[in-house]
Each structure stands twice: as structure tokens, then as C-alpha cells.
Amino acid sequence: MHHSFRKTPTITIQVLSTLLLGLIFALAPTFNAATSASAASTSATAACTADNSHLVAAYGGRYFLSGVNVPWQNGGYGADFATIEEWGQHTYSHANTDAMFAALQANGVNTVRWWVFADGRGAPEFAASSGGAVSGLDSTTLPSMADAIGLAAQHNIRIVFNLWSFDMLMADSSAYVKGEHAGGHTDLITDATKRSSFINKAMLPMLAYPVPGTSYTIGSHPNVLGWDIFNEPEFGISDLGAVDGQISQPVSLAQMQRFVAEIAGAIHRNSNQLATVGSAAMKWNSDVSLGATGNVWKDSALTRYDAQGFLDFYQIHYYSWMNGDGVYWSYAPTIIDWAAGGFDKPVVIGELPANAAGTGYTPEGLLNKLHSNCYGGAWAWSYAGVDGAGTWSNIASAMKTFNTANAAEVNIVLGGGTQPTATAIPPTAIPPTAIPPTTVPPTATAIPPTTVPPTAIPPTAIPPTTVPPTATAIPPTAIPPTAVPPTAIPPTAVPPTATAVPQPPASQTIYSDSLASGWQNWSWDSKVNLSYTKKTKVGTSSIAATFTKAWAGLYLHTDSALSTQGYTKIRFWANGAGGNQQLMVWVRDANGNGSQAVKLPTLTKKWVLVEIPLAQLGNPSNLSDLVIQDAQGRTQKTFYIDQIELAN
């Protein structure tokens, strides 16, 4: 977000310094637009890494992310995707988005950074009028995001969704000023339960949402490049001395780092997309830049909170106040190149003035300079011209010239591989909520798949074997298509050994009247009673579950993963009480690897014994998560589950 002035002593001094030095930089030869463009063209090959490690790794290649910010559409701050309930504001427009993406495509743009929650006034939904835990998302957020993604795919654009801005830490607003839920969300960062509520009730269901007409969810769609977790968080961190004057309850650096890490970890565990943070300036993202505080977003600062909580690329913002004196301090990427900044990851200039005001360059010269200084991308602020930093019309021509000249680095090619994600690391304590896998209904003859699209994580579902077993064809997985045997794979015989091998018990209980020791209920968007006594099959209690939202899940988790050695199937009883529920089952191991989903037969009024061969779930070596999930994208009436166990 463009901020020309900050109400803090540190930033005020920097702005005044910039004003005093403006004439010097305006007259200095290095700030001549023509000479800077020439210098860029001659220095890029010599200065930048031969292996292109300064560019952003995505889709099996390395790319320069060239694009613009879409901070809000049609003046709807926080209302692009969500709806501000107090006055019914929802500004997302299919037609306007289509026209915008067409204009960007015509000028070679490959990415946009688009805001989602901003200060929280429209979404997510909160359980209290002031602050509070997240209870879900409103009815417009996910469909609007999915529609934008579909249009992005048509125009070869990739979206980086920005989740939050430091504005969420501003004073709580009243209903008819900014909106009842605008600001006042310090507790979402500082309170572990509320952080978890955001991840489980908003972030992961968002990743799980199917994009209509495709085989993807939002979290697996190739036109979602990644997620910018927080815009300019430094302006809400007390330790850094740059707190915005409208924020009365800032958070500590450690609290913000934990918030970022836990969300980044959730993204890495539940999608194939990238994570970044929109740092307000190089000052807080470099250990060696002139006058820098230090890199507060490096891996060691984040992964202590979540092993997969790292950022895939850095993102810093650039406006004229950052130029400095070039001797004692400067946070300008035009002055400090990627190598001089000591960065250990690619760096995208996530905001820069579209009109290049105060930079000493023309828009074209600015793009060339950032490129020759080996940065990994540049996103102009902003498409719609929401403030004095310029609009798309100021930089469109420069973008086209730049993107044409650097087509090899800008034109993203799919199919060269998948987007890089973390090497599998055991998940941390924040429970990863399920991505809704898609299913293909069992059938005796080949028919087109249902309208619920398959997802990449986990891939397309396979009908389970039930009792009695059915003779149904098993469709291949979605990405990549591979043959799957139509019947369960029998367990491999254990070769004889010189000494007796202890045999596991005939079954290993997960639920029998209550959850087995160490198992926890992590269900989302559900009403779950683990001790229901009025309808049981085995013993005295069963699980009664009601799904209150689409893609809800009955989610059971243990921190001590259950070994599957010696077992061949998961077995449980199910009863729909006449609700005709359509559900699916998938599992996750201790390394966070999710299985493909297995569709259950439609539940009836009778108890049915369900047995799912572990072979259909990818033969996991252990189980840490078992999920029974809605398979239709709708609410589901109360159903009952009893006696869940591993069996042989």
C-alpha cells in the first residue's frame, strides 16, 4: 500500500531526508532515466546469477513476475470477494475482471497481486462483533475468487492473493463507519485458538474450494501462483519502531512471525502454491542493506514456529522515501541490488509507483533498473489508481516493452514441472484442515465424472470396497492419470525371519465408544458429538456428525501416528438415518502426505460396514489424520459413525 508518510519518528526522519535529498538525486547522473535503462541492458547478464536463482521458482522453471496490484476493485476495499454486510457492498465484477485481465494479457503481464481480507470488514466471518475467532467465510468470497481464477486461466494470468494488511490491527470500527469487523483483530495474531480458527475455518477451506469447470481447487489451481500472507506487517509491529499512528494495539515481532509461519506452513501442507509476505521496505528484509534493521522474514526466524513456515520468495515494497542518502542508509532496490542486499531467496518488488514518482526514473527505466539489479519481479501499484502512486495507464506501455524484451523470463510455461514446495516435514501443532478431494461415483460402465472437479491434493477419489464388495471400475487418479487396479491389493506376505516377529493385534482402535488415547477431534464446519448414545452399532456410544457447510469434515487427528504395519484396511460402521449423505474418506500420514479420497456408498437408514483397503489410500506407513468429508459441496444431515479401526 502506498504510504508517503508514516506517523513515527523514524519514518518521519526518513521522509524528510528524502525530501532534502530529492534535488541531489534528481540531478545525479545515476538517476537519469535514459542512462539507467542503458546501464540495465548491459549489466543484467554480468550481475545476475547464471543459474537464475534470483528469479522466482515456479512450474518447473524460473521467472520474473511482471504485473500489477489489484488492491480493490471498483472502490470496494475489503469487498472485492467478500460482502460488507452493513451496507451490502460486494464489488467483484466478472465483466470488469475479464476486461482487466485482457488488458494485462495484451501487454505481456504474467501476475497480479490481489487483496482478499484487507482489514477484515467483509470477510472472514467472526464469532464476535469486536475481534473474536473466525467462524467461516461468507457466501460470496469463495465463488468470486474461483470466478477470478477461471478468468485468469483464460488470459494466462497468475494470481497472488494477499490475505491481510496491517489495517486489520487498527482500532476496532463501528458498524456504519468502516464496518463492524474492520480492524480490531490483534487477537487473531496473538491468541493461539483464534489463529487456529482462521487457519481451520477460512484459510484451508479456501484452499479446498473447487474451481467450477476444472479439475482443481483454489489450492491446486495452476493460475494461483501463491499467497501473500500479510501486507506491510512492519507497520503493526511494536519492536520495529514504525507502528502506524492509527494502530493502538500493535503486536510483537515474535507474535507476527508466528502468525506468518503458521499460515505459510498450512499453505505448504495443503496446496502446491507459494508463500510470501509483503514487507514494507528492504529495511526489514535484509541483513546487510544500508541502515537495515535485519531480515525478520528469513527461514530461521519463521521455521522455529512451524517447520514448513518459510517463505518461497521475499517481497519488498519501494517508494521514493526509501531512496535515502545512498551512503548511510537506503532501502531502494534501484540503489541496492539483489546481491548487495545479501538476499538468500528471490525478491519481488511487490509494490512500486506505477507513475515512477520520486524514483528518478521513467516507468520503463524503473522496470529495467529493477531487472538489471537482479530482482525477481515487479508489481506496479496499482491497476485502478487508488491513490497518488499512479494507475495502469501510467505503466502499461512500459510493461509491454519490458515484457516483450524479456519474454524468456516473463512468459510462464506450464508443464515443465510442478511448483516447488517444501520437502515433506512432519506437520506442526496447527491442525491442517482438509482440502476437499473430488470423487467419481461408482458405476459399472464408464461415464463422465461428476460436476465436482478433482483436486491435486488429494487427487481424484476411488470408490471403496464395501461389504459385500461391489464390482465397480476404479477410475485413474487425476494428476497425472495412472492406472489403478480395480480391486484391493492383497497384503504382501511377510517373509520368514530367523526370530519370531510379534504380530499386531487383529485390529487397532481409533474410536470405540470414545476416541482412543491420543486422538483428537479437529473437525471443521461441523457439529460433532463423540458420545451419542441413541443410535449405536457397537458398544454404548457412536459419533453423531452434522455438516453445516459445504466440504465440511469429521476430522480425527493424533500427534502419535498409528503404524499401519500388519494391517490391510480401515473399517467402520456408518448410518445415514435416511439422509442419503454422500461422503468420502481420506487420510494423512505423519509427514503430511494426504492420500487420494475414497467415496463411500450413499448412506441409508441402515448400518453398513465400510472397509477401505489401505492400498486404495496409497498404502500409508502410518496414520496421523483420518477425515470423513462431504463429497457433494453442500451441507449434510446428521449421520453416525461407530467403531473405527485398522484391521487385517
Image (cartoon, rainbow, N blue to C red):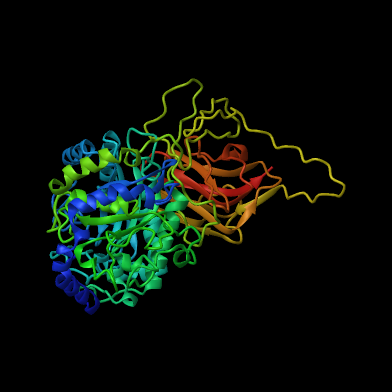
Q: Foreground residue, 147 or 229?
A: 229
Question: Is residue 186 left or right of 497 when viewed as pictured?
Answer: left
Q: Nearer the viewer, residue 161 or 621?
A: 161
Q: Nearer the viewer, residue 224 or 435?
A: 224
Locate the C terminus and report the quarter of the image it occupies.
Answer: top right
Regarding residue 193, the answer to whether it shows in the image is no
Q: What's the residue at 71%, 45% (across, down)?
A: 566
Q: Residue at x 47, y 33 (%)?
A: 478
Up-down relation of residue 589 to residue 475 (above or below): below
Q: Residue furthest right?
A: 498
Where is residue 236 shown, x and y percent of the image? 29, 71
Whether 397 is drawn above or below 266: the answer is: above
Give the x, y percent position of residue 647. Answer: 66, 44
Q: Is residue 458 visible?
A: yes
Q: Residue at x 24, y 49 (%)?
A: 38
Q: Is residue 48 above or below residue 257?
A: above
Residue in the picture at 51% in, 57% down: 530
Q: Residue furthest top?
A: 445
Question: On the rendered image, what quadrant is the N terminus found in?
Answer: bottom left
Q: Nearer the viewer, residue 218 or 5?
A: 5
Residue 39 drawn at (x, y percent): 27, 51
**Furthest-bottom residue in view?**
9
